């Protein structure tokens, strides 16, 4: 299976969970300036996440992503989740100047799942 077809098949086979988890995102913006930001996920699946940002990132750029698990019910001995993500989608956010960025994890995949906030 080609990488593109495999990626599309994986996107369709993984359910996105609407959940707000704290995220620390670090990378370079579209002009090449380094940034680091604390934000929250909009949704999450094992192979990617979406989050809001005010930074101008470019599709295809690589970001470092950390999900601190201290604020979440962590399992004993569980470490913060750290991975790299490639920006695959950008859309306008609710507030002016804000964007919703979708990243595909190109490092470790997220193995923890949570109940959707819409399920409450």
Image (cartoon, rainbow, N blue to C red):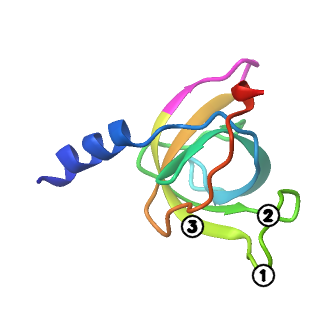
The percent coordinates of residue 42 (x first, y second) are: 67, 35
Q: Which residue is mark 3?
A: 83
Characterize the local packing of mark 1: few (<14), some (14-19) or many (20 or more) Cα atoms within 10 angstroms.
Answer: few
Q: Nearer the viewer, residue 12 or 100?
A: 12
Q: Position of residue 45 (x, y in %)?
A: 53, 47
Q: Residue 111 lies in what quarter of the image?
A: bottom right
Q: Nearer the viewer, residue 4 or 70?
A: 70
Q: Which mark is residue 77?
A: 1
Structural crowding at the residue carrying mark 3, measured as other residues with C-alpha within 10 Å and reported as few (<14), some (14–19) or many (≥20): some
In the picture, the disc for residue 69 is: 2
Bounds of the magenta segment: 90-97
Which residue is rendered at x = 76% and y = 47% of the image?
21
Q: Secondary structure at mark 1?
A: loop
Q: Is residue 14 magenta?
A: no
97 vs 88: above or below: above
Q: Could you say which is closer to the camera, residue 118 or residue 87?
A: 118
């Amino acid at each position: 299976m080609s990488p593109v077809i495999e990626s599309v098949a994986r996107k369709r086979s993984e359910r996105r969970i609407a959940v707000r988890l704290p995220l620390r995102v670090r990378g370079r913006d579209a002009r090449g300036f380094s940034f680091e930001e604390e934000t929250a996920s909009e949704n999450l699946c094992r192979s990617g996440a979406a989050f809001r940002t005010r930074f101008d990132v470019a599709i295809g750029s690589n970001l470092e992503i950390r999900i601190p698990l201290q604020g979440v019910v962590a399992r004993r001995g569980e470490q913060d989740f750290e991975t790299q993500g490639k920006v695959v989608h950008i859309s306008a956010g609710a507030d002016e100047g804000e964007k919703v960025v979708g990243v595909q994890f190109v490092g470790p995949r997220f193995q923890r799942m949570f109940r959707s906030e819409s399920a409450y």
